[in-house]
Image: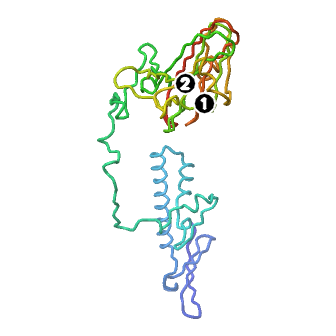
């Protein structure tokens, strides 16, 4: 081991320094009295190193804990830590946030402070009794049964047992059950060309519209047709009975009008024979049908009710006519079937 030598140095201000030499390597040892207050010393460096070691150890423990809790690798844990919110990432106090890429309809309708209810406000619910509540709800797997009558607005829906199809009837059939379906007919045997069998009436003016079909048959060749607004000599012809097709209970009268009497009588039609047929003239021919010998019954207008039905105007005269085309004996058969209802029925 080399010999240690100490040389004492004194600066002009009287501060003492020492130089130690161990072997051929000298170093300066400064006396603590020569340092300013708070200067770094060898002892203080050791303290700093100790604190740094403690910090590194704590960071290592934190990384280990994160890895155990989140099953992360050390690299992932470091990335997670570097993504933590810091004071640099916070918005400053009093900052303004701008909302962009908003469509006008949404942006103008955004909730603002002015649209909020004040603190401590009171909300009043009106008509609470009509609101849906838990007590008003049906239970799970409930079975619904519709009860009521026609007058209460509810009826049972009848289903076919085999197919579960809804059992229903068409409108003309329904009108029979509603007691609004009517019928009249007239048969006449004629023997000359141009002889006519005629049924006429005036439609009601009470808001009800007549939905009618005309069926005709003849023994020999004839032509059948419908006239709207013909000229009919007043108080001519003869009354013809109109039947309500629902025969049970109180019979509802038809609104069609017989013009053969003075005054006119509702719930009746008018018939004209080969003798009185000249009292019906003119008018607009709406439809016609040719019948050959022994043909019928046929419906004027078509083969289905959707094709053959006519909805007649209010307060208007109509005539339904069969006319012979030869001078053979010829039996005419004329049948009218209709129902009456308003536009919203």
Q: Is residue 95 left or right of residue 65?
A: right
* Residue sitting at x 60%, y 23%: 320
Of label 1 and label 2, which has the lower sequence position?
1
In this rendered view, identify the residue nearer to me: 309 or 25.
309
The quadrant holding residue 91 is bottom right
* Pointer 1 local density, CA inside 10 Å: few below 14, some 14–19, many at least 20: many
Q: Residue furthest bottom?
A: 13
In the rendered image, residue 312, in percent from the top left (x then y), is placed at 58, 31
The quadrant holding residue 134 is top left
Q: Is residue 144 left or right of residue 15?
A: left
In the rendered image, residue 327, in percent from the top left (x then y), is placed at 69, 8
Assign a secondary structure to mark 1. Answer: strand
Assign a secondary structure to mark 2. Answer: loop
> Disc 1 marks which residue?
232
Q: Is residue 321 left or right of residue 206?
A: right
The quadrant holding residue 121 is bottom left
In this rendered view, identify the residue nearer to me: 89 or 295.
295
In the rendered image, residue 213, in percent from the top left (x then y), is placed at 57, 22
Callout 1–callout 2 Cβ contact below 8 Å: yes
Q: Which mark is residue 237?
A: 2
* Pointer 2 local density, CA inside 10 Å: few below 14, some 14–19, many at least 20: many
């Amino acid at each position: 081991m080399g010999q240690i030598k100490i040389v004492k140095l004194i600066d002009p201000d009287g501060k003492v320094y020492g130089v130690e030499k161990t072997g051929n390597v000298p170093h300066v040892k400064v006396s603590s009295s020569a340092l300013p207050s708070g200067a770094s010393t060898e002892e203080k460096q050791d303290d700093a190193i100790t604190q740094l070691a403690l910090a590194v150890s704590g960071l290592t423990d934190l990384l280990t804990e994160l890895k155990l809790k989140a099953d992360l690798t050390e690299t992932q844990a470091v990335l997670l830590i570097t993504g933590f919110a810091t004071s640099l990432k916070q918005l400053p106090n009093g900052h303004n946030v701008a909302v962009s890429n908003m469509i006008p309809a949404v942006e103008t309708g955004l909730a603002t402070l002015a649209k909020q209810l004040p603190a401590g406000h009171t909300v009043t619910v009106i008509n609470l009794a009509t609101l849906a509540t838990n007590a008003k709800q049906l239970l799970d797997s409930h079975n619904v049964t519709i009860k009521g009558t026609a007058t209460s607005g509810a009826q049972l829906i009848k289903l076919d047992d085999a197919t579960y199809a809804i059992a229903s009837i068409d409108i003309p059939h329904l009108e029979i059950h509603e007691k609004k379906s009517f019928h009249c007919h007239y048969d006449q045997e004629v023997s000359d060309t141009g002889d006519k069998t005629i049924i006429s009436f005036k439609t009601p003016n009470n808001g009800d519209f007549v939905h009618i079909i005309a069926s005709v048959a003849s023994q020999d060749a004839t032509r059948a047709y419908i006239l709207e607004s013909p000229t009919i000599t007043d108080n001519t012809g003869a009354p013809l009975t109109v039947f309500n097709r629902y025969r049970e209970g109180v019979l509802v009268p038809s609104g069609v009008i017989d013009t053969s009497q003075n005054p006119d009588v509702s719930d009746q039609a008018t018939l004209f024979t080969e003798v009185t047929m000249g009292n019906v003239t003119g008018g607009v021919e709406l439809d016609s049908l040719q019948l050959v010998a022994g043909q019928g019954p046929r419906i004027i207008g078509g083969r289905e009710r959707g094709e053959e039905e006519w909805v007649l105007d209010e307060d208007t005269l109509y005539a339904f006519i069969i006319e012979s085309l030869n001078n053979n004996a010829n039996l005419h058969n004329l049948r009218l079937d209709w129902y009456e209802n308003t536009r919203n029925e």
